[in-house]
Every structure is written in C-alpha cells, then in structure tokens.
Image: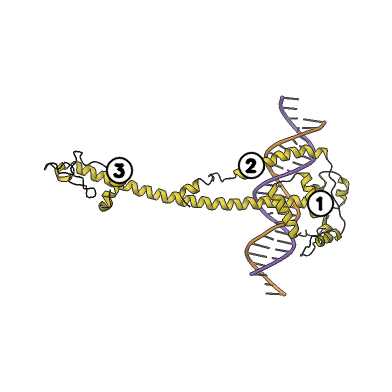
Chain colours: A yellow, B purple, C orange
Amino acid sequence: MGFDDICSSGLGLGLGWNVKQENFSQSDLQQKKRKSLVRDEHFFPSLTLGPSSDDDARKAHGDDQQASSVTALSSFSNSSVKKEGDVEFDRVSSRVGDEDYEGCHRKKLRLTKYQSAILEDSFKEHTTLCPKQKQALAAKLDLRPRQVEVWFQNRRARTKLKQTEVDCELLKKCCETLTEENKRLQEELQELKSWKLTASYCMQLPAAATLTMCPSCERVANGGDGPPATTTSIPFTIGPKSHFINSLSHPSAAC
DNA sequence: CTTTATGCCGCGATTACCTCA
DNA sequence: AATGAGGTAATCGCGGCATAA
C-alpha cells in the first residue's frame, strides 16, 4: 500500500466516522419521526408468564442451546401492570428490572443462532430501530422489545469499536509512511546543502581548472583549448535535480 | 417568545454472567 | 475441578432533543 493509497482511503485525521455519523444522523431523523409516532400509537408489550413460551420458541427455531429463564425474568411486576399499554412500559419496567428479578442477580440470556441471525440481518438494513420495528422484531424472536433495543445498542458499540481499531491501524501506517517520507526529504536536503557548499567553492576557482567535463554525459564546458566536436558553447550548468544530485554523490550513475 | 418540566432515546462506561481453553 | 480470558447481555447515568404547559 502506497502513501497515496493510504491518504486517498477517505480516512481523515479526525478519525473517519463519516459513514457512521451519516447513519446516525439518519437515525436522528428517524428518531424525530418516531417521536411523533410514539404519541399517536399504542404498543402493547407481549407479556408471558413462565418459561413455556421461551421453550416453545426455541423448539420452533430449532435451537440447540438451553432455554434460559429470561421469560421468567420478564417485565411482569406491579409497576409494569400499572403502566401496561403505555409506550414507556417496556423500558421503564426493564430499568426497574433488577427489583423485578425477585431480588436475585440478573440472569443472562444467550441468544439463539436464529435470533442472532435475524438481528444481524435487521442490523444490516438499519442500525437503529423505530418502536414499530423493535416491537415486530421482538415478537418475531420472542424477546422483549427492551432486549432487542439493548442488542442493537451493544451491536452499535461493537461496530464502533471495530471501526476505531481499523482507523487506528490505518493511522499507524499513515504515520509510518510519513516518517519515511520525512526521513527521505531530510536526507535530500542534506545533499542539497553539501552541494551548495561544493558549488560555492568551485565558483572561486578558475573556470579552466574546474569546468572540464561532466563525467557522465561527457559534455565539456569552456575549457579554453578550442571547441572540440562535442563541445557546446554553454557553460557547465546545473542540470535537473536528480542528475545533479546523483552526479555529485554517484557520478557514474548520472544522466 | 422564553422558560421549565417531562419523556424518550442513544451512548459510553461498567457490571455480571456464561462459555471455553 | 479450578481458573482466567474473552464475549456479550444487561444496567446505570448522562446529555440532547422534542413537546407541552
């Protein structure tokens, strides 16, 4: 990968979040729309009591993992009942969740392959969900909407983390390339400086003694012995940079 | 029009659980 | 069997935004 490749990769030094921020700004728009939706629509969380539905769902999905007791930890509580029918119901109940978990530590749900696959597919389509989509997805996967919401949040976080790592790597490479370039330019500058010294020294000497012949292209400058066939009337002048620098350091490689 | 209160949502940081080597 | 590491679901707290009063 060359320097140009790296620098044209669209990566800015501000850590290129362009794509993602686009996504988020879109989601912001969605969010704004959503907020107006929320007030007009009523979502009714699907409450299940006991683990049976979970088991059924897992059987139906051909799950190979043990059914967790998540449903048993569902948002069924006094506070939940009070807020049933409220849009905020699921979120509020889940945030009060720890108290609902019968005073025990939280259990951890392990998503099935089927659930993960569906969620992944959905994430590919849109990284954020409107309440309707969330509700539908939750119903489809037999999860609580809050769980779907959490999954999307964590998924976004993982994506961002991965992207950060990728950007970090690119920046590292970019830094290495620039360091190399800097080193090369420093060396070139040194050569130019040393040539300048040499040139100013030569200018102080008689032309005949110094300007004889370019060792590479064999062009003779004013030597004073009459013009040979290949002689030009142009004094030995500075050639193109590369020629000149090379002829100083590696005379044989010049021209 | 401005201010204040409220609700909703996403995010970052963190915790807690689970699996696997 | 014990254990440490890694993955990830779940929680907490905060800030931004929209809306109603």
For label 1, the SS is helix
The label number, if any, that marks residue A240 in the structure image: 3
For label 2, the SS is helix
- Discs 3 and 2 share one subunit: yes
Q: Quadrant of residue A227?
A: top left
Report the chain holding disc 3. A
Where is mark 1, residue-wise?
A139
* Number of residues whose C-alpha sits closer than 10 Å to that of mark 2, classed few (under 14), some (14–19) or many (20 or more): few
Report the chain holding disc 2. A
Residue mark closest to the camera, 3 vs 2: 3
For label 3, the SS is loop
Q: Quadrant of residue A210?
A: top left
Residue mark closest to the camera, 3 vs 1: 3
Residue drawn where x is 78% and y is 50% of the image: A137
Residue A100 seen anywhere in this rendered image of the structure: yes
Going from N to C along the chain, the mark reached first, 3 or 1, is 1
* Number of residues whose C-alpha sits closer than 10 Å to that of mark 3, classed few (under 14), some (14–19) or many (20 or more): few
Q: Is residue A206 left or right of residue A166?
A: left
Q: Amino acid at mark 1?
A: Ala
Q: Is residue A247 left or right of residue A140?
A: left
- Discs 2 and 1 share one subunit: yes
Where is mark 2, residue-wise?
A22
Q: Amino acid at mark 2?
A: Glu
Residue A102 seen anywhere in this rendered image of the structure: no
